Image (cartoon, grey):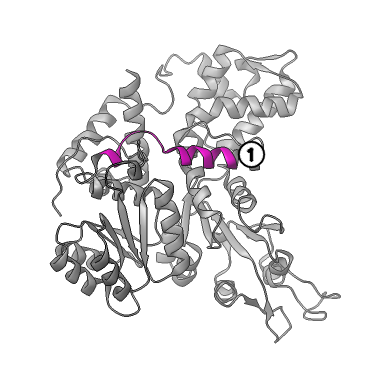
Amino acid sequence: MKRVFVPRLSWAPPAISPTAMNAPVKILLVEDEPAQRRLLAEFLQSLGYETAEAGSAGQAIELLNSSAVDLILLDVRLPDQSGMDLLGAIRQEHPQTPVVVMTAYADLRQAVSAVKQGATDYLAKPLDLDELAAVVADALADRTPAASAGQPAPSVEASIDRLKKLLPGLVCESPAMRRVLQTVAVVAPSDVPVLITGPTGSGKEMIAQLIHRASPRSAGPMVAANCAGLPETLLESELFGHTKGAFTGADQARAGLFRAAQAGTLFLDEIGELPLHLQPKLLRALETRQITPVGSDRPVEVDIRLIAATNRNLAEEVQAGRFREDLYYRLNVIELAVPPLVERPEDILPLARQFAQEFAGATVRFSPQAAECLLAYSWPGNVRQLRNAIHRACLLCRGDVILPEHLPPPAAALAHSEDRTTKPAGRLSQLERAAILAALEECGGNRTQAAKKLGISRRTLLYKLRALQEEQSSS
């Protein structure tokens, strides 16, 4: 696939809403799953795009014949016709319209075939909304350059402000966390499952709580369970309940977590630890909205929304045979990646001040040297480690100023380290910057190919590009 290199360092939401331009940017979504289609439409509308929706190839053809569109998002699996066949028809009648193909099983051969048949780009399901936004902006770059640069549309800021009111104490000063909240604002009103990924201690449960509070189910309960913290022998009973006498020690019937979360949200943390033999039962519960308690042969109707979280790479777990592929795709309708704290340095000091206020019960200041240590440390334990560090500092601090010696030794040592770099956390080295720019130029501006060439994920590359753009704008 040949692309013209456009020297844009990173994607950002539209500076000026595309609908404010002379000709609104209109995107046609061809997707047979109504919930998925609606979710994608809401996300694209939050970026300022106008959308049209088709659930079949026939509907898509009718819409294309009746109105002009600027971009087509095309699922390859449609009920009445193959998306690949529809792509051929679109290329004959609308050769200049960009088409981005969505393939459910990340079939590289199918994606390559689509590109050969004239697709502009492809996306693998389950979709990553950051990647979707970047690919859409890339595809529209030549047609609507104003829609691919600048600052977020006002609706994005309004959505983030509304979410912050739902969860007091929520810190999201960094661009990385603001992008997470933008996705939450789009995902929360729907009922689709969400898979939250990210390293241990990064705040995955907080994001799950935020999704619940922003959803139509907020009046119902949110029930949380850690799959790694429950004994494997009792996990099935904990999830689905049991009848009296179902097994030794079952002196009373138990409803289970699914029924406890009725009309609300069930949050399963560490879903990657779920035993393989229970995964088919969870899959069936999600697909049929019914559970069968242990010791019973009568299914029970349940109405819950499932949010799962993991610090594992479930795609790799599937390849290793430790996680069912069908359950992975069922859970991962939307993947929401919470970045590690080292990739959101703007959040470190606001979080530290918030934790200090919580533990000290009064305003506590950080000396310039202590603040510098907090910013320079890598925080491998993420937000949880930072919280514990501030708790320790508040206990050791006898006044209202936290000094470097009050911090844990690994962070405090940075105040006296001669080898410590003076560059702020998150900045790129000259070597890293040169490698990224060279890879982009060599790949014709294609971020996906450049990320593969650099041996990093596309999301990581986007983070680094944004950091590079911020460095250039501040220099």
State the image quarter where residue 63 is shown: bottom left
Q: Does the magenta stretch include residue 118?
A: no
Element class at badge 1: helix
Residue range corresponding to the magenta coloring:
146-162
**How far across and how far down the image is residue 449, in percent?**
23, 49
Give the answer, above or below, for where 389 lies relative to 331.
above
What secondary structure characterizes most of the magenta part?
Answer: helix
**How far across and how far down the image is residue 125, in percent?**
37, 62
Question: In this view of the protein, can residue 317 be seen by the observer?
Answer: no
Q: In which quarter of the image is the N terminus?
A: bottom left
Does 396 sit left or right of 340 as displayed?
Answer: right
Give the answer, above or below, for where 243 lies relative to 116.
below
- Closest to the observer, 158 or 252: 158
Q: In which quarter of the image is the C terminus?
A: top left
Return the residue at label 1: 165
- Closest to the observer, 110 or 40: 40
Does 393 sit left or right of 319 as displayed?
Answer: right
